[in-house]
Image: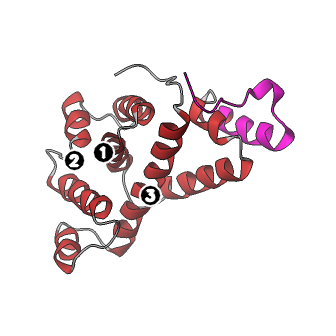
Amino acid sequence: MSCISTVNPETANAAQTKLFDAVQKQVGFVPNLMKTLGHSPSALEGYLSLNGSLAAGVLSPQLRERIALFVAEYNGCEYCLAAHTYLGRQVAKLSANEVGAAREGHSEEAQAAAALQFARHVIESKGRITDVVLNHIRAAGFEDAAIIEIVNHVALNILTNYTNNVAQTVVDFPAI
């Protein structure tokens, strides 16, 4: 049972309804995470804006989902693990092995593995990485735009992980 309820789209105020309608149009339904964030239309709008902007960035959907899976595993977010396992398999077309590896911060692809290792360093050091770590991600072929986007994907996923962990959001994606 959730600690913070979801907003019912049928009784939502005008600001919530506008955002829920946009999510419905894009995703096909309004996930419980959005209904939870919807308590604060500003928080939901901020999440949607950053998520949409990063989706148009330089990182591939596959790498974005790998990062989301790793961060969710690291933070013990069952909601995000279910959501990103589904999205990783159905949208990003990651294999079951790659989904499992990403959860542990690994990949069979060298560049993806380097990005996940970098994401781990960012989380564990609270963003205070060393020159060695920065040089390693650059040597893996990542330019500054991609490095900044990896950091932002880590932060975006921490935001949703913490929201779900605090709210104990009910999972509405297929169980993993």
Cα–Cα gap, marks 3 and 1: 13 Å
Would you name the residue on which mark 2 appears?
A: 105
Taking the spot 84% from the left edge, 37% from the top edge, the residue there is: 13
Taking the spot 61% from the left edge, 49% from the top edge, the residue there is: 48
Which of the two discs, 3 and 1, sits closer to the camera?
1
Image check: 36 left or right of 161? Answer: right
Q: Amino acid at mark 1?
A: Tyr
Would you name the residue on which mark 1 appears?
A: 74
163 w.r.t. 96: above or below: below
Where is residue 141 shown, x and y percent of the image?
22, 68
Which of the two discs, 2 and 1, sits closer to the camera?
1
Q: Give the residues drawn in magenta, as a range.
A: 1-24
Image check: 21 left or right of 142? Answer: right
Q: Which mark is residue 155?
A: 3
Taking the spot 63% from the left edge, 30% from the top edge, the residue there is: 30
- Determine contact: label 2, label 1, CB under 8 Å: yes
Whether the magenta-drawn stretch holds residue 21 is answered as yes
Mark 3 or 1 closer to N-term? 1
Cα–Cα gap, marks 2 and 1: 9 Å
34 w.r.t. 110: above or below: above
Q: Quadrant of residue 117?
A: bottom left
